[in-house]
Amino acid sequence: MKRRDLLKSLSMAAGGMLWTRNLAGQSSQGESKAKARLATPIRALARKNGQVYQPLEIHLEDTALSGEAVTKLDGVEVDRRNVETGSHTFDIYLKPVNQPKQSTVTVEIIGKAFTDQVELKPVRKMLVYVLPHSHHDLGYTDLQADVEQKQIRNITRGIELARKTADYPEGSRFVWNLEVLWGADLYMRRSDESARRALIEAVQKGWIGINGSYANELTGLCRPAELLQLFRYSGELGNTCGAKVDSAMMSDVPGFSWGTVTAMSQAGIRYFSAAPNYFDRIGTFMVTWQDKPFWWVSPSGKEKLLFWVPWTGYALSHVMKLGDELVSKYQDRMDEVHYPYDISYIRWSGHGDNAEPDPELSDWIRDWNQKYEWPRFSIASTSTAFSAFEKRYGNQLPQYRGDLTPYWEDGAGSSALETAMSRNAADRINEAAALTALGKINAYNPSSYAEAWRDVLLYSEHTWGAWNSVSDSENPFVKKQWDVKRAFAVDADKLSKDILAQAGGAQATESSANAIEVHNPSSWSRTEIVYLSHELSSAGDRVTDSRGKPVPSQRLSTGELAVLVKDVPAFAAASYRLSPNKALAPNTPVSYKDHRLSNGVLELSIEPSTGDVSALRLHGEQQNLADNRKHRLNQFLFLQGKDVDHLQSSSTATIVVEEQGPLLVSIRIESSALGCKSLVRRIRLSAGADYVEVANTVDKLRAPLNPHPGVGGPGDEFAQRGSKESIQFAFPFAVPDGKMTLDIPLGNMRPEADQLPGSCKNWLPVGRWVDVSNESLGVTWITQDAPLVEIGEISATMLGSQRDPSVWRKHIDETQTFYSWVMNNHWGTNYLAYQEGPTTFRYALRPHRKHDASAASRLAIALSEPLLSRPSDSVSQESESLLRIEPAEVIAITLKPSEDRKAWIVRLFESSGQPRSAKLTWAASQAVQSWRSNLAEEKLEPVGNEVHLDGWELLTLRVEKKAP
C-alpha cells in the first residue's frame, strides 16, 4: 500500500477529516473536469508591455458558438477576441487588486452570455524556496533492503536531474536535498570510486545539498552521546566533499528534545527544517508552529537554531500537484496565518515516501517564472533558503527557549526489551571509548564504533515496522520488517559488549587471577559495589586494596562476589587482591526486618500484601517520601484500552529474601498480574549507599491478535482500538512544596514550565532521572531502561490514529506523582501489535537533602556505565588519573580517542545549570595542548587548562600530546 492510499484509509476511518482540514476546496481531476469553471483567477502577477497585471483564466467548454467573444468584469469590458466552436482556454489581464474583491465575469458570444462569480485576491510578492527531497522511511511501505536501494538510486537520479537542468534559468535548476544521511552513507560505502566522485562533485557544484541529521530520529529516546552521534556523520561527509554543513532536515516526527539544539550546534548546524507528519498523532504541534519561524535557543542559552516548519510538513507533494491551484492555495495559507515575510519555503518530497526526485519540478518552475513575475519559485538547498531568510529577517524573529516535547517516542514502548537494549548499548559504547582513551589511543578502531553507533541510531529512527504491523501482524512482510528493526538493537547490544570487552582486555585469565583492577570511566571518583563473577572471584571472599587494607565483600547466592570499592579515582584504576579468608563486613551493615530495609542512610518499607513500597525516608527523618493516597511506589498498573477508572494492580505478593547482608540485601517480590505470565520485583539496598535499587521483570503475555488479519488495514476498528493495553509503574512522592524536574539529553526541563507550546503533555520522554525536591528535602528517581513517563495522572490514553488537536492534554498541573510507562501497543500502524516474554526495568530511588542536579546525573551515569573489573597479574598502587576535572558539577560526558587517533576528545557538560569555571588537570606524564573543538574534532581555537561554561553548556575539546 502506498502512503497516499494509507492516508486515505485512515481518513475514512475517522470521518474523512484529513482531506477537509486546511486543504478544503482541493478536488480530484475527475471532479475538476466535471465542474470546469468559466473563470479562474490565477493568483499571480504577469508583466505585459511594461505593466503588471493579474491574470484571469477563461475556459469555454465545448461551445457550439463561433464569433466575437466579449469578456466583461462587473459589467466593464476587459477583453474582446474571436473564437471558433469547441473548447477554448485563454488568459485576460486585469489591474491587480490590493484587497479581496468579489466580481462577476460574463462572456458573451453572438448574444449568448456565460456567467461566473470569482474572488480576486491580492498577489503576494514573495519568493518561495522549494526544497526537493525524498522522505526516508527505513521500511514501512517496503522492506528495508529495498528502501536502501531506492535511496541510493535517488541520489543518482538527483544528480542526473541537476546535470540535465544545469543550463536552466536560475531558480529552476534542480537541487537534490539529502533529507538525512543514512542513504548517503550507504551510497559512499557501497558505490565504486566513480560514483563516489560523482556525489562529491555534485555537492561541490551545489547540485546536492547535505543536511546534517543521520536519520529521522526519535530524539527523546537518545542518550546524550547518541544525540551527538546523530549529527557526527555530517562533518565527515562535509569534509569529504569540501562543503560546510549548516542545515538539517527531519521529517515525519513531531517534536524534538531540547538538547537537539545543543547537539546540532556542535556539528555547526544553524538551520533546522522540521517537517512533521501532517495529521496523525501530532497533538498541537503543527497547529502551533506551521509557517512560524523562530530562533530555538539551547538550554545553556549560548546556541540557537533557526527552526521552521513549512505548510503541511513534508507532505505537500503527497496531497497537491504542481500547478496554479497549488500557488493559489499556498497564498491562501499565508493569508490565513498572516504570514509577515516575503520569503518562505515548501518541502517537495515527490509522490509518496522514499519517492524518487520529481522530474517535472524544474520544468514547471522554469515555465512559471518565465510567465509570471510574482510569486517566484526557486529550487534550493535548505542552507540556501534559510540563509537567505536569515539575512533578510533573522533579527526580527522571536526567540524561544524550552523543550519541544516529542510525541512519537511512545511507540518505543511497543518493543520495550529492544528499547532497553539500545539504550544500554549506547551507554556501553560511550564507556568503552573512555576506557580505550585511558589505555592506548592507537587501539581505538573507529569503524567498529561507527558500526555500533549506526545500529543504535537506526533503532531510534522513527520507522519501526510495516504499515500493516497491527492489522496483519503475522504477515511475512510484517515479520521481515520487524526482524530487521529488532536486529539494530540486538546487533548494537552485541557490538557494544564486544568493544567494551576489548577496551577492558584482561591481563590474566579469569581462572588464574587472584588480583583485579577496577577501572573508572568517569570524570569523578566513585564509591560503589562491583560484582565479580564466580570465575573472576574464585580466589576467595576476602578482598584487600593496594595498601593491604581489607574492604567489605559478600558472596551472593548467584555465586558472584559483591565488593565495596571506595574512591576509585577519576579516569583511573584501583587494584585489589582476593584471598580465601573470611570476608570483611561493613561497619554499619544493611538489614531487613519486619519488611523494612535500612542501612543507616535511608529506610524503605514494603507493604507485605502487595509488595509495593509504602515508605521511603532518609534515616532519622519523619517525612515519608511516599504518597500512599492513591497508589504506592513501584505499584504495577495494567490499563486495558483507555479505561483509567478500572486500572488493575498485581495480586497478593510472595516475598523472599535472596541476599541477607551484611553488605547487600536483596528482596524478591513475586506476584501474578493481568497481561503477564509473571511479575517479579526486586529491591536491593547496600551498606552505606544513599540510594536503593529496584528491578521489575515483566514476563509479558501476547495481546490478542486481529481476528480478521489483513482486513481493513490500519484504519480498521481492530488496528485503531482492538486489544490495546499498557503497563505502568507508579511513583507518587510526598515532598512538601516539592517541584519536579526531568533530565533530558544535554539539559534539564520542568514539566509545563519549560515546555514550548505544541509540546506533548500526555507523556514525556525522560533521559536518566526525575527529581522532586523542595529547598531542603527531595528524592531522585533514576531509570535505566524505560524512557517514558506520565506526569500527575494516567494520561497516555491516545489509542490508534489521533488527528484532532483538541483531544490532547493541554496543561500539566504541579504534581509530585508520575508513572513509568513501560509497555504499550497503542498505535494502529508502524509499531508492534504485541510483545511477549520477560523484560526488566531497572530504577533507583535516592532520598536527599537539597536538590543537586549534578549529583543526580553522576549517580545515574554510574548506574548505566558501571565500574569495569578485570583480572590482573598483580596488585599495584592506585593509578594516576589521566584527567581530573574540578568542580564535580562539570562532567566529562565523553572521553574518547579522536577518529584520527592523534588526540583525546573531551566533552565537558555543566550539569547543575549554573555558570562554572572548570579546571582540567592532566596526568604529570602528559604534556598537552588543547583546542576548542566540535563534532568534526577540528582545532577551532587554543584553550588553556581552565575554561568557562555556562549552565547546561556543552564544550568539546581536542587535546593532543605536545611534541617532545
Image (spheres, rainbow, N blue to C red):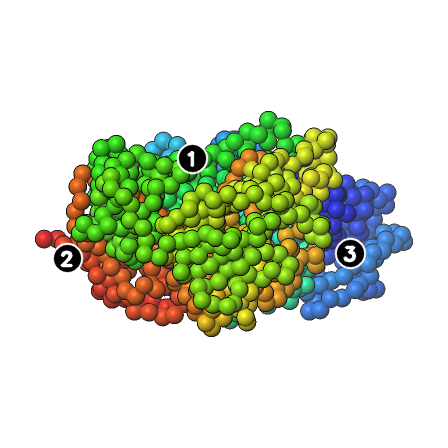
Front disc: 3 or 2 = 2
Q: Which residue is mark 3?
A: 80
Residue shown at the point (58%, 62%) measured from the top left: 627
Determine which quarter of the picture holds residue 914.
bottom left
**Which one is in front, 303 or 511?**
511
Give the SS element for disc 3.
strand
Residue 12: x and y, percent? Answer: 75, 43
**Mark 3 vs mark 2: which is more N-terminal?**
3
Q: Is residue 794 above or below residue 674?
A: below
Q: Whole-percent x and y of residue 441?
A: 22, 45
The amino acid sitting under disc 2 is: Ala
Q: Residue furthest front?
A: 594
Q: Which mark is residue 491?
A: 1
Question: Residue 756, can we see it?
Answer: no
State the separation of the CA atoms marked 3 and 1: 74 Å
Q: How many marks?
A: 3
Which residue is drawn at the image coordinates 48% and 62% (left, top)?
617
Bin the neighbour count of mark 2 within 10 Å (Cα to Cα): few under 14, some 14-19, many 20 and up: few
Q: Nearer the viewer, mark 3 or mark 1?
A: 1
* Above or below, comparing residue 496 to residue 749 in the picture: above
User: Which amino acid, by three-letter code, is at mark 3?
Assistant: Arg
- The residue positioned 82% from the left and 64% from the top of the image is 74
- The numbered mark, 3 or 1, whose residue comes first in the sequence reads 3
In the picture, the disc for residue 924 is 2
- Residue 537, how many percent across, how many down? 29, 38
Give 775 or 530, whichever is nearer the viewer: 530
Residue nearest the viewer, comparing 454 with 615: 615
Task: Please indicate whether residue 945 sits to the left or right of residue 774 in the image.
Answer: left
Q: Is residue 300 above or below residue 432?
A: below
Label for residue 826? Answer: none
Question: Crowdedness of circle 1 by 10 Å Cα count: few (<14), some, many (20+)?
Answer: some
